[in-house]
Every structure is written in structure tokens, then in C-alpha cells.
Amino acid sequence: MADGSQELALSGGDFFRAIWINEIVIGDTEIRPMGVHSIEFDADGTAVLSFVAVLPGRYTLSVPGSSGDSLQAVFNIQ
């Protein structure tokens, strides 16, 4: 979710390669992509990802250039 106060990107190429994406929903639009490397918000809004974990490992989605734990999500796939 982005509040629109600034451009926000989420990067996690390794994570996106370790999952099968069922769909990404942005507003009323459903997207069923073959692959994703990152998601970027230019305005306020919410994106919902529906996925199935495929490759075991520890993966991180983060805001590029950030170092705070609050600006990342860690997924442990077993």
C-alpha cells in the first residue's frame, strides 16, 4: 500500500522467481503476469498479490536503497 506522498517501489527479483503468481489486483484491475521483477506505486493505492510458493529459501521484498526493517518483507519458503 502506498499513501501517495512519494513514489514507492518494491523490489525482489529473487522472490518473484521463487513463486508462481496467480494474479495481482490493483484497484478493480486483475493482472495475471508471466513474471514480475518489481512493483512501483506512483500514487496512493493498494496492490494485492496472490501467489503459490515454489522454490524453498529466504527471500526479501524491499524498498530499493532502504536499510530499515520496516521497509522490507521477508518470506521463508520451506
Image (cartoon, rainbow, N blue to C red):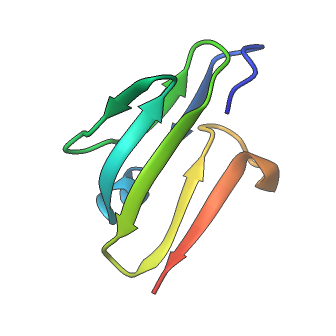
Q: Residue 16 lies in what quarter of the image?
A: bottom left
Q: Give coordinates of residue 7: x percent, y percent.
A: 64, 17
Residue placed furthest toward the bottom: 78
Measuring 51% from the left and 26% from the top, which residue is drawn there? 40
Seen from the viewer's position, the closer of residues 72 and 52 is: 52
Q: Give coordinates of residue 23: x percent, y percent.
A: 34, 44
Left or right: 3 in relation to 53: right
Q: Give coordinates of residue 70: x percent, y percent.
A: 80, 50
Left or right: 49 in relation to 63: left
Against 76, residue 45 (above or below) is above
Camera sees residue 11:
no
Quarter of the image with the N terminus is: top right
Measuring 62% from the left and 65% from the top, which residue is drawn there? 74
Q: Residue 76 lies in what quarter of the image?
A: bottom right
Seen from the viewer's position, the closer of residues 53 and 57 is: 53
Camera sees residue 76:
yes
Against 43, residue 35 (above or below) is below
Quarter of the image with the C terminus is: bottom left
Residue placed furthest toward the front: 28
Against 12, residue 59 (above or below) is below
Against 56, residue 75 (above or below) is above
Measuring 34% from the left and 63% from the top, which residue is drawn there? 19
Q: Give coordinates of residue 42: x percent, y percent.
A: 57, 13
Measuring 61% from the left and 30% from the top, which residue is drawn there? 46
